[in-house]
Structures are given as C-alpha cells and as structure tokens.
Amino acid sequence: MTAITAESSLLGNMNQGRWALLRFYAYIGLSLGIAGMAMYGADGYNEDAFLYQILSMKGLIWGGTGALIGAGFAATLSAMKPSMLLGRVAPNTVPWLDGMLLMVVFSVIAAQFEPAASQISYEDQSNLIAGEIIMAMNVVFIFSAVAYIAYLFAPEAFIGRIATGSAWFAVYAGGTALLLRWHESYLFDMDMGHAPVSNLYEVFILLFMITATVYLSFERRYQAKGLGAFVMVLVSAGVFFGIWLDSVGQADIKPLVPALQSYWMKIHVPMNFVGYGAFAVACGAGMAYLVRHAMEARGSSSRMLNVFPSLEQLDQLAYKSVAVGFPAFTLATILGAAWAAEAWGGYWSWDPKETWALIVWLVYGAYLHARVSHGWHGKALAWWAVAGFLVTVFCFLGVNMYLSGLHSYGRLT
Amino acid sequence: MKSFTDLFKQLWQRLGSMSLAIVLLMVLSIASVIGTVLLQNQDQGDYLQQFGPLWYWVFRSLGLFDMYHTWWFLSILGFLMLSLSACLWRNVPKMLKEMRGRKGTVNDRSLSRLELKEEWQLEGDLSAESLQEALKKRLYGWEFKATEENGAHFLRADKGRFHKTGYISVHAAILIVLVGGFLSVQYGFRGNMAVPEGKMENTITFLKGTETAALDMPFDIRCNSFVIDFFPTGAPKEFRSNLTIIDEGKEVLTSDIIVNEPLFYKGVYIYQASFGDGGSDVSLKLYHLDGSQRTRTVKTGVYKTWTDKQTGTSIEVTDFRPYNVENIAENFGEKKFQDIGPSIEYVMRSPDFKPVKIKAYMNPYIDANGNNQGSWLMVSMSGDAKDYESVSLGLDLTNPQEWKLFHAFFNRMSELQGTRDEQANMQAFKQAMTDVFGENRPEGFQHMAVRTIQAVQMLPKLPWHVIPMLEDYGHVYYTGLQLAQDPGMNTVWVGSGILVIGLCIMFYMPHRKLWLVIRPESGKTHITLAGLTNRNQLSFKETFNDLFIQIDEDFKNQSGKG
C-alpha cells in the first residue's frame, strides 16, 4: 500500500492478478468466518468483548478457516475462468485491506508494551501508550506537511519521497493508536470498553487518517504530488486542534453514555468521516487550483508550476474526491437516520446536526449539478469546493461548539 | 390559447432545468440554517424575552419558532419535488432510448472529435476477426457489438451501459424519500409519556405548533420498575424500564426496554427517552430557628406543597435524587468521584422573605480526608439552578445531639452577656458539653466544637423560620417513554437504499465506450481505436493508454505473422 511497495516490482505483483484475487477472497472468507463465529460460535456474540473474541484462538480458527476456504474458492474459480484475473475490483481493494490488517498487527504488537494492570487507573491515563503513538503521529503529520511545502519550492524527488513516506507513517501510527485505544478502553473495566469513535479527539485522528489516505491514493494514481502541501496543511491545522484538545483533558477515555451504546456508532461515525475526509481533499484540490490559476494569470514561470498538477487535473481531482465523499456522506446520513429511528423515535428530527448534514449534502449536491451544467467552470467550482468544506467544518465542529441539540455528547466541555 | 400552452411548456422546461435545481438546493440549505441558529419549539415567553416584542412578532408571524413545518418551508420542498418530477419526466425517455439503442458504427466526423484516439497503419491485409479478438481478449467485463459497413469493420465495446439508470434512480429515490417523509408527518405521531413505577398510563402528549396536544393510545402501559446502572466512574451506564402492555384489560406482554432497544407493539415503537422522580414520598425534618430547639417531621411528596399555617411558610418539593455522584477531590484538576447520598430540592416561600430554591443533602459532607464538615445546602436566591451556592450549616443535623449542643452553647453564651473572648467561648462550650453529654464526652468532640462554633456564626444569619432537611424517603421513579408510529418510515428506507445504489452506479460505473474501426486500404490495414467516457476522464485515459500499449504489441505480432 505504501509508495515504497508500489515501486518494488515483487510487491507490485502481489497486488495484481492471481495473488490479489486470492487475497481478496481470503479477506471475504475471513469476515464471513468471523460473522459465522458471532452467529453460530459457542459463546456467540458478546458486544463488550467481541474484539477479544476475534483475537482469541477461537477467532483465529473461525477466521482462518474462512480465509482458507475463500482463497481456495478463488483459486478454483480463477482456474476455471482465467478472465476473472483481469477484473479491477480485487487489485483495487486488496491494498486497503492489507493496510488495515497491518494496522491490526501493529496494534497487537504495541499492546504488549502497555503498563501492568496495577499501573492502570481511570483517573490518570497518562501512562497508556496510545497517547505516545498519537503524539508521534502529530509530529510526523506536521513534518510531512513541511516536507510537502518544501517540495513545492525545491522539487527534488528525495524530498517528495520523504514527504510521502512520513505521511504514510503517520497514517499507520494513527490507525495503530486508535485500535490500541479500543483495547485500552477495556483495560479499565470490561464494561467500559467501546470503539474509538466516541468523542471529538478520537474522530479527529480518524479524520486525519482518512484525509491523508484519500490524498495519498490520489498521489499514487495520478502523480499529483503538488497537491500534498495543501491537503497536509489542512491536516496539520487539525493536528494542532487535536493537541489543544489533549491539553484541556479531552483526550481521556470515558465510558459511553447510554445513547451511544449501539453497534450503529461503529458504522455511522467512520462512514461520516470518509465523507468529511474526502471533502477535505476536495478543498485542498480547490485551493491548489486557485493558487495555480492566480500564478498562471500573473504569467509566473516559477518552478513550482512543474510540480503542480495541471488545472484540468486539479479540477478532476476535486471532483473525484467529491465523488468519493458524496456517496459516503449520503450513506452515513442515512445510517444516522436509521440509528435515530432506533434510539430517538424518529429518523429525522430537524436537530441542528441533522440539519447541517442536510445542508452539507445540499451544497455538494449543488456542486455536482453545477459541474454538469454548462454555466460553471474551473475557478467557480474550485471556490465552491473550498466553501463547501467550510460548511462541512461547521457541520462537524461548529454545531458541536455553538448549537445545542441531540448530538451534544460531541460537545466540548 | 397557443400562448398559454407555450407558456406552460416553457414553465415545464424551466422547472426541470439544472439551474433551477441549483437555485432550489441553495435556497433550501440557506433556509435550513435559520432553524439551527434559532432554537426551535422553545417556550414563547423565552423568545419574547430574548428578542423583544417587535422582533418576537416578526419572527412569530414568519413561523421561525417552528420553521420546518411552516407553509413556506414546505412549499420549497414541494417545489423541489415538482422540479424533480419535471426533470425525470423530461429526461427518462431520452435516457432509456439511449440505453437501448447502440449504434455499432461511428462516422469519421465524430471519430475525429474524440480525444482518446490511436491509429495504426499495418502492412498486409489482416483478418478483421483476429484483430477484434485481440481487443476482446484484453477487455474483461465489456459488451461487444460488431458491424460491417462498406467494407469497414466496426467493433463497439461498452462498459457500464446502464450508467444512466444511476441518474434516474437517484432522482426518483429523493422523490420517494420525500413522499415517505410526507406520509410520516401526515399519518404518524410521536409523543411522550411519563409512567411512574407501579402506575399505568395511556396518553401521550406532544407539541403541535406552539400548543401541547394529547393523544390516547390503543393500549395501556404499566411501568413495573425503572433501574439505573452505573459505571465505576459514576457515569450512568444503562437506563432500563420493565414495562407491561395492557390491551383491553389483559396483560399481553412484559418486556425490558433500554436506550437503543425499543419495544414494538401494534405498530407503535416505545422508546426509553428519559426518567425522573415519579412522586416519591419524603419526610422532612424541620429545624425551627426561633431558638426553641424544636423540630418536627412533615410527611409530603415530590411535586407536593406543604404549608405551615402558623408561620405561613410553604415548601414545594420539586425533585428528589437517591444519589449524587460528585467530584470531591480538593485540588483543581484532580478527580475523585463518589456518591454523596440522597438530596431533595424544594422551593421555600414565606411572607417574610423572598422565595428561595434549595437543594438539601441528607448526609453531612464528608471531605476527601474523611472529615465530617456538617450538613449543607445548595441555595439559589434567584430560583435558577445555575445560581446555586453552597451553604455549610456547620452542624451535622443527622446527629440530634449536635442540635441540642448548639442550643446549649447558644444559651450559655447569652448567659455570658456578650463577653466574647476566646476564654469565655471556651468556657461556654465546656458547659454546654456537660449540659448535653454529662461527663462522658463523645469521641471526636473537637470536630464537634469546630462545627458548633461555625453554626453559631451561620444559623442566626438565615432569614428563614425553619431549615427543612430530608429525613426519610420512599423513592419512586417515573420512566419517560417516547411513543411513535411512523407509516412513512419503510418508504424512506426503500428510497434511501435506491439513493445509495444509484449514487454508486452514477459515480463508480461510468459509461465507457471503445470503437475499433478496421479499414483495409490497398494491401494495408488501417486501424483506429477510440474511446469515450462520461465520467472520470483521468483514470479512463490511463486505462486507454495501458490498453494501447498491450494491443499495440498484439497487432504488431499479428502483422509480423501476416
């Protein structure tokens, strides 16, 4: 998944053809196996400890069997119908799943370094190591932003590689830390454990990861390295906010209020942040467009223009990010409505958060319509992508800070 | 007459147009902002106070206090539906026709306009079929159509031919969702019901505009019990009600509900929404402040008012809490959560002083070091909970002897006729101790001394006739239920499903077309490969270039063989 693996042909082959297909089906088998364990396993599904059920010997047997069956299925199928190997779905999906698996492995390793049970207390959480990893992530994200900016002014391949590498490092650190926090929430008390998407601090880390990953996957496919400076500056701004949250004591793991104790939280929240993250990348592309446009208008011959993607490319990238974010955001809003129907007695209550989600949806809906109709072109749409993200930020942060409503558990205290 | 039909046609055209859609979406989003900034459905008095009479009436006449149900907001939504219908009406037939018909041939003019195009001029008269096979082998999951016209062989390849169904389903889905919403509002209900433990209820209340309305349910609900579970940190973990549904006098079903796990009966969802005091019985012990050392016990209940005819003091009990988890750490920033016991909240009124809101704790305050700091109250002079200030009474009133000691001390002090030095105080206290306890001094009497001296300074300052403290209680919760029936919900889910699927088709399954045109030209073969996509040009360009590299090799091989 990293740029380094992409450049090596051996690992590159891993993500093509037969290997990709085998792994793709193995992953499907793995998830089916774990689903099977939840439904038919001896201990069944235990919401509070499912994480440990998966990581136990039994989880390994159920999941491993599923993965083997999946891989065997893929091997047979591809032998019978070789044209299957030309499909794009498996090679496009597998690197993402590999990355997630790698994060799980990292977090399991990191979990071995947690302090002894007697040293862990709810009142003082400073000795837990997820916090250290998050701090490392913060530093590396900022370093990466600096490297990307440096790359604009000194377009050396070496600097570019450092920027990309550090961004990937930070993404993996963030993912590892979040998974570790999930584990840590169980260390205080089994009943207190919950997925690490329950407060502003945790979802911020998720947002950095998703924004950076969406950007990095574009960088790999479309060689759009000049865009990195803009996206990473946005991420760094968020990182500073996250550090501030930590400094005012918002980083502590707290038990979940009853309203949030639902499996919907694990689906609704991450899905929303896929949307937010993609909109952030669209905003970065919009800003890059405006900068390049201004430079071209001045007749600049700066070297910077060589590393910038072309105007048309930037326009396309902004659109592509919205194309990722819009369906994800739509789905997230629908999932939120489904949760609301189950917890609050109605799928839509015109609660400020819901209404702002609708506003964000309408703004990007209008953006998509404006693109197709002929009156609007590059520059106006670039402004729209930037403005749309400001609306998104208000929906995500402003509503929690300034408006009251049913989402008030996301509030700053 | 003609002009009328023309006008209508023009209007219809405009209704379905893209620019109107953009304008409508933006108008709708700007209008929605108002309702999030202005808190909806609050008390009218609060609005009046907040905005003043002029703006209050302006906002009220625009319906801004319940704006998502005003005629003008609903008409924007209606207009959106109309525009969507017009757009679908106009475009669907066109799109269906386009999807069905696939022209195999392509003329030179359109070919020359295509951006993605590669050409070969190969030696020899190559078999069109084998060239076409070479392309087919490289395209997985594409549909092909071969045509021959005037000696030229055309092969058209399509992927994502049904891309346009994405547009159709997304727009239709939004219509379906809006129709579902209309059904919910028109034929559904949603309201609240408070059922005290052990009692039965069958009416829900809800806000209708600015009024409260009531609705009878076709069944009764009895709350058997309501329980709160806590985390070790003191934060609530679970609110659980045990309910029995009683239909036509028969108990049909008994079940637990918690937040996120509602109960469903006869088309009505029953949700755990809130809780509160269900009218607990409380005994108050009144400590008379007239120096008579008199106390008396009064039995009353939450939401009841007790009046003392003698002094004209009335006590309205507003709330009771069986527990209060508070941070008792002494240093700022530290945390030490602990239950400090039951509390009662009441408003005390009298002709002699301004009404005062009080929260009285049953237990004395034990600080983080385990020292008894005496009984205490939270007092709000304004009647607002945010103005609470803690008042330490000094005495631990749960110990009747301290109340005696306080009075004995007071009497001894007055005997000393105002000589107020340390020595005299000390002597008075010693005498008071002997008055109350005789020769056997209780353990920790030094702390008692400190508390009593504090009380001597504090209690005479209180303007009240009595201090009401909580003596005993029989606690009853009410469970706050929300009941909802929503006949439009399933329609909304169907619409949402179609919406997501449609969006995925729209964004991730672009319609890509490729043409392979093979023209034999006097011993040579002229080949053109051209491509077109309606979305995601960037990645198609890449795919096209990859395809070109592969196919170029294939063609050259064939040419070499030929």
Image (tube, rainbow, N blue to C red):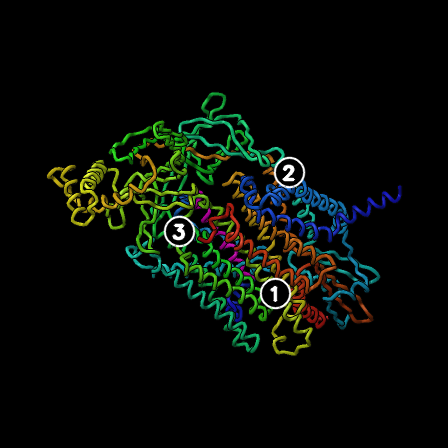
> From the viewer's perspective, is residue B77 above or below residue A369?
above
Do the residues at pointers 3 and 2 share their chain? no
Residue under label 3, please give it: A254
| Nearer to us in this view, B401 or A153 | B401
Callout 3 crowding tier (Cα within 10 Å): few <14, some 14–19, many ≥20: some
Q: Could you tell me which residue is drawn at 61 percent across and 51 percent down?
A: A359
Q: In which quarter of the view is residue B81 placed? A: top right
Q: CA distance from mark 1 to mark 3?
A: 37 Å
Residue A63: numbered disc = none
Residue under label 2, please give it: B182
Callout 2 crowding tier (Cα within 10 Å): few <14, some 14–19, many ≥20: some
Residue under label 1, please give it: A285
Q: CA distance from mark 3 to mark 2?
A: 40 Å
Residue sticking out furthest to the right:
B1
Q: What SS does tag 2 mark? A: helix
Label 3: chain letter: A
Q: In which quarter of the view is residue B158 placed? A: bottom right
Q: Is residue A26 magenta?
A: yes
Q: Position of residue B486 (x, y in %)?
A: 57, 35
Q: Position of residue A39 (x, y in %)?
A: 45, 43
Secondary structure character of the magenta stretch overall: helix
| Residue range (magenta) | A17-39
Q: CA distance from mark 1 to mark 2?
A: 39 Å
Task: Tell me which amino acid carries mark 2.
Answer: Phe
Task: Tell me which amino acid carries mark 1.
Answer: Ala
Whether residue B476 is visible here, answered yes or no, is: no
Do the residues at pointers 1 and 2 share their chain? no
Task: Tell me which amino acid carries mark 3.
Answer: Lys
| Nearer to us in this view, A103 or B378 | B378
